[in-house]
Image: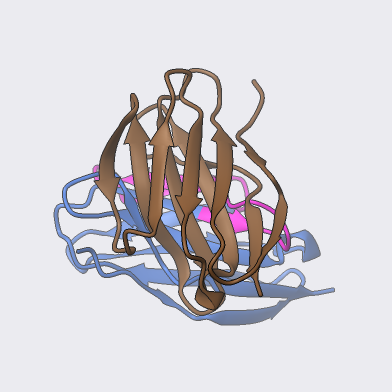
Chain colours: A blue, B brown
């Protein structure tokens, strides 16, 4: 099956700083890479995704970059705000299906 | 559109009992997937149903089972509960593609 590694497990930043979370995967056939945000006590929600035919996608303060050759993709959050504090999960479809294997999550803490 | 809903939201059971969780997908979504979320193991895939058929299955014992009805609502059943089954159980619906829309989850505590 798909092997997804996510780093770091915890990330603490000051408000206004940038945050970067990286995921590596094993299946070179994977072509869809979403990121989910889960606030404390709430459900995971899709915040951005990228397909393998592009290298970067932006949506306001968040962006995702993809390096298919190296099999890794990253979530970038600029000008972080306290409300960005949450657990972020990457996901990669596995085994030729679209069922995602999730990374272990990154707990992002933004200090005011 | 209304989001994914799950009932009940909280549940306390004792070892050996069984439990049934329910999930109503977003209207028009035919795929429902179930996940177990624990601090130690993260988000783990249980199974996926599409048009009343189990289409994908994760690596969980046979005590975990599910079904889907003709209106796409899905139920998950866990028999002979163990302490280690304590977790947040999330269901997610999709049109049949990759983007998963999650419900609020059912938090199960096994004593």
Which range is magenta?
A: A36-61
Q: Nearer the viewer, residue A19 or B11?
A: B11
Q: Is A37 part of what is drawn in magenta?
A: yes
Question: How many marks on residues?
Answer: 0
Residue A35 image offset from top left, x and y in percent: 48, 54
Q: Residue at x 32, y 59 (%)?
A: B62
Residue B81 image offset from top left, x and y in percent: 51, 66
Q: Is B3 part of what is drawn in magenta?
A: no
* Residue A56 versus residue A22 in the image, above or below: above
Q: Nearer the viewer, residue B24 or B103?
A: B24
Q: Nearer the viewer, residue A3 or A84?
A: A3
Q: Residue at x 42, y 18 (%)?
A: B70
Q: Nearer the viewer, residue B99 or A67?
A: B99
Residue B4 image offset from top left, x and y in percent: 60, 34
Res B98 → quadrant = top left
Res A79 → quadrant = bottom right
Residue at the front extreme, as displayed: B16
Q: Residue at x 60, y 61 (%)?
A: B88
Q: Residue at x 41, y 68 (%)?
A: A103
Quadrant of image for the C terminus of chain A = bottom right
Instruction: Specify whether residue B97 is in view.
Output: no
Res A101 → quadrant = bottom left
């Amino acid at each position: 099956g798909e092997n997804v590694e996510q780093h770091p497990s915890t990330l603490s930043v000051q408000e206004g700083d940038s945050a970067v979370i990286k995921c590596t995967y094993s299946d070179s056939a994977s072509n869809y890479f979403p990121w989910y945000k889960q606030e404390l006590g709430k459900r995971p929600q899709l915040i951005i995704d990228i397909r393998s035919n592009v290298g970067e996608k932006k949506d306001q303060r968040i962006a995702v970059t993809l390096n298919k050759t190296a099999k890794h993709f990253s979530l970038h959050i600029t000008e972080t705000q306290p409300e960005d504090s949450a657990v972020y999960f990457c996901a990669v479809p596995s085994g030729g299906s679209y069922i995602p294997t999730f990374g272990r999550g990154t707990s992002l803490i933004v200090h005011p | 559109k209304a989001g994914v809903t799950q009932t009940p939201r909280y549940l306390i059971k004792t070892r050996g009992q069984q439990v049934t969780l329910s999930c109503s997908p977003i209207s028009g979504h035919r795929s429902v997937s179930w996940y177990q979320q624990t601090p130690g193991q993260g988000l783990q895939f249980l199974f996926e149903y599409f048009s009343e058929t189990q289409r994908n299955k994760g690596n969980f014992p046979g005590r975990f089972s599910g079904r889907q009805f003709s209106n796409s609502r899905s139920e998950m059943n866990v028999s002979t509960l163990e302490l280690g089954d304590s977790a947040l159980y999330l269901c997610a619906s999709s049109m049949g593609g990759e983007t998963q829309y999650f419900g609020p989850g059912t938090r199960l505590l096994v004593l």
